Image (tube, helix red, strand yellow):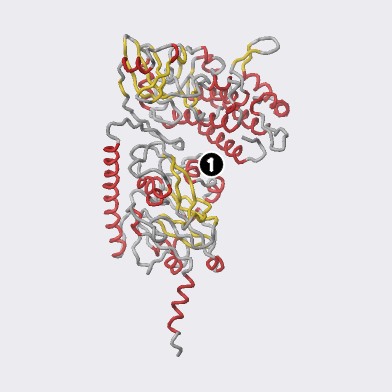
């Protein structure tokens, strides 16, 4: 017998494991690993195969990320493909919590590691690289890779910081593809999992699963909050996913699983201690500084009401901030621009009735609702300190003919989405739900980045029993043209009152005209909603004339010099507006419907190469 025959099994093993990745184990919980001497599984998967590929991740729904739209945005995945592979027909529909979803992504080599890339805005002062990696992204990234790919020190991570997030993924080697392996699914391990169970669930060879992840045997320990790669010959399907129960039966067998549970429990305690440690360290570092707790742009849905502690300002502080309420600081008859400890704010002088608005805004904490920083009472007057919105009201911005930024569909549609999401929060997620009752372009404010926030909550009312229904018909002059028929006729107020007003705002965004304007020919007052409705009443006629109503500043020119037809996007927006302006409140769209439709339009416009140029 040849002396080299004993090497045959070893050579066979080596050939099968060319694409092998190493399982990280609980190294990912450390956050202090290094990869100076070579790739480490505590960071990401090593780039050792095809340079780029389409692949899949497993992600569990959680609060704030439980619709196709919110999850696709978090993970930068194509929402249409995500919905298709998971058998979901409504991208805005709330999904059950802890439901596994298959997430399609593009995985590519970046240096020595594979990654699918996304971005994330840090939501609060108390978030760390560890919590973002293991809770928000559920182990699909690691704190080591987050620290390596971002400029912020782990003790200097603040609300509003935008992070580059590399997601754990891998591509098969040429040898693997020749052997029929097309995808390497990044699978999130849970408490009840074992290597054998995962193999059986995805109908893959136990040997392939063991070799792919560098295990020595199928009895090796695996830990929750970590990932392993599942080699697949076909695209994964929704039938292979599950909804994880919160009250799980822990009757697990075998010493390895018991040990894994004990180790996992220890890790949870260790994680908690680590998070507390970082928070205490950061609090010490920030001692003496006033750090603002703000919410990121991508958290738009499902936020619970929050009773916020407002700062009580002294009148002397406000006088100093506004140079004695000088004319040079005045933004309107009752609003002044000020500076408090280096932060630019808007200070509004109101009467004694302001307590209602303060009480309401204390309950809210949402990106698309104006932020109230604090209050001051002085000489029977009340002063409210708000976040400062650099671009003023939507009404002023639309009428500013010198504003170049208004000349894009992108900005107009994004403003519409922001307002819709603010109303969606008020109607569906605030506790209790509220009707704003005074939606108009004067009460929608724009930040320096043209993000819209709803303001003026003095007329808002709860939808709780006893507070909804009929109301006295008293609205400011600015509300003319926005009031729903049932409110004008009988003072009847519901969430559909806001929907009607939003429909008018949407028309303003498309046309650039006021809700009520004078006819150029005879000087008579024209209701924008009525004029557009009369044209859209005849669909065929409307298609021919809608271009006359598009704001000329939105005219888009192709690189070759010809004007791009914008009729399609305008028609979609106007039809959506008509769904808001139905005379019968029961036939009007809900804010959930509106947000979903607007986001689809927004996505189509962004992806279009011929609709317009920015």
Left or right, 317 with respect to 371, comes to: left
Q: Where residue 337 sits in the image (x, y, percent)? A: 42, 18
Q: Where residue 388 sits in the image (x, y, percent)? A: 43, 23
Q: Where residue 463 sits in the image (x, y, percent)? A: 42, 24
Residue bearing the label numbered 1: 90
Left or right, 258 with respect to 556, comes to: left
Examine the rendered structure and indicate whether residue 466 appears above or below residue 198. Answer: above
Q: Where residue 207 sits in the image (x, y, percent)? A: 44, 69
Viewer-closest of 29 and 99: 29
Number of labelled discs? Answer: 1
Viewer-closest of 266 and 44: 44
Q: Residue at x 45, y 47 (%)?
A: 165
How would you rate the neighbour count of disc 1 (Cα within 10 Å): few for under 14, some for 14-19, many for 20 or more?
A: few
Viewer-closest of 529 and 346: 346
In which quarter of the view is residue 280 placed?
top left
Where is the C terminus found, in terms of image quarters?
top right
Examine the rendered structure and indicate whether residue 201 appears above or below residue 513. Answer: below
Q: Residue at x 39, y 48 (%)?
A: 147
In which quarter of the view is residue 411 placed?
top right
């Amino acid at each position: 017998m040849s002396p080299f025959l004993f090497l045959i099994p070893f050579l066979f093993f080596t050939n099968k494991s060319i694409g092998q990745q190493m399982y990280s184990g609980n190294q990912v919980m450390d956050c202090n690993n290094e990869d100076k001497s070579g790739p480490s599984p505590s960071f990401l998967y090593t780039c050792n195969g095809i340079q780029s590929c389409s692949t899949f991740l497993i992600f569990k729904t959680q609060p704030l990320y439980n619709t196709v739209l919110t999850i696709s945005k978090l993970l930068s995945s194509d929402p249409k493909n995500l919905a298709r592979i998971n058998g979901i027909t409504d991208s805005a529909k709330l999904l059950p919590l802890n439901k596994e979803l298959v997430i399609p992504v593009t995985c590519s080599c970046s240096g020595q590691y594979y990654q699918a890339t996304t971005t994330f805005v840090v939501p609060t002062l108390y978030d760390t690289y560890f919590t973002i990696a293991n809770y928000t992204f559920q182990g699909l990234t690691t704190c080591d890779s987050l620290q390596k790919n971002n400029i912020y020190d782990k003790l200097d991570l603040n609300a509003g910081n935008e992070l580059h997030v590399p997601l754990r993924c891998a591509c098969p080697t040429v040898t693997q593809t020749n052997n029929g392996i097309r995808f390497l699914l990044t699978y999130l391990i849970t408490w009840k999992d074992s290597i054998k169970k995962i193999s059986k669930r995805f109908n893959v060879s136990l040997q392939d699963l063991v070799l792919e992840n560098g295990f020595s045997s199928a009895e090796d320990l695996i830990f929750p909050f970590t990932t392993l790669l599942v080699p697949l010959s076909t695209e994964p399907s929704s039938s292979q996913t599950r909804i994880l129960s919160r009250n799980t039966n822990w009757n697990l067998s075998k010493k390895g699983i018991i040990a894994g549970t004990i180790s996992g429990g220890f890790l949870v305690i260790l994680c908690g201690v680590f998070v507390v440690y970082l928070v205490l360290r950061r609090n010490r570092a920030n001692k003496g500084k006033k750090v603002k707790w703000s919410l990121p742009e991508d958290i738009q849905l499902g936020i619970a009401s929050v009773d916020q502690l407002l700062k009580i300002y002294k009148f002397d502080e406000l006088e100093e901030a506004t140079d004695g309420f000088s004319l040079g600081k005045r933004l309107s008859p009752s609003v002044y621009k000020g500076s408090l400890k280096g932060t630019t704010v808007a200070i509004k002088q109101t009467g004694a009735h302001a307590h209602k608005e303060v009480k309401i805004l204390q309950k809210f904490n949402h990106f698309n609702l104006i932020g109230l920083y604090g209050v001051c009472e002085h000489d029977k007057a009340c002063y409210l300190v708000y976040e400062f919105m650099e671009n003023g009201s939507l009404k002023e911005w639309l009428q500013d003919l010198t504003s170049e930024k208004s000349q894009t569909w992108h900005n107009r549609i994004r403003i519409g989405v922001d307002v819709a999401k603010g109303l969606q929060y008020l109607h569906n997620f605030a506790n209790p739900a509220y009707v704003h009752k005074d939606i108009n372009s004067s009460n929608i404010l724009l930040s320096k980045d043209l993000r819209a926030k709803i303001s003026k909550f003095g007329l808002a009312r709860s939808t709780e029993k006893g507070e909804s229904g009929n109301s006295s018909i008293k609205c400011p002059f600015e509300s003319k043209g926005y009031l729903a028929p049932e409110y004008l006729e009988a003072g009847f107020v519901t969430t559909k009152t806001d929907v009607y007003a939003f429909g008018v705002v949407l028309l303003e965004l498309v046309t650039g005209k006021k809700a009520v304007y004078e006819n150029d020919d005879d000087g008579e007052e024209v209701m924008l909603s009525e004029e557009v409705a009369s044209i859209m009443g005849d669909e065929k006629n409307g298609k021919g004339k809608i271009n006359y109503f598009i704001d000329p500043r939105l005219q888009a020119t192709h690189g070759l010099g010809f004007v791009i037809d914008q009729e399609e996007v305008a028609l979609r927006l106007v039809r959506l507006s008509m769904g808001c302006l139905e005379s019968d409140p029961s036939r009007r769209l809900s804010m959930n419907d509106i947000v979903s439709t607007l986001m689809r339009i927004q996505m189509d416009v962004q992806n279009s190469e011929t609709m317009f140029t920015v």
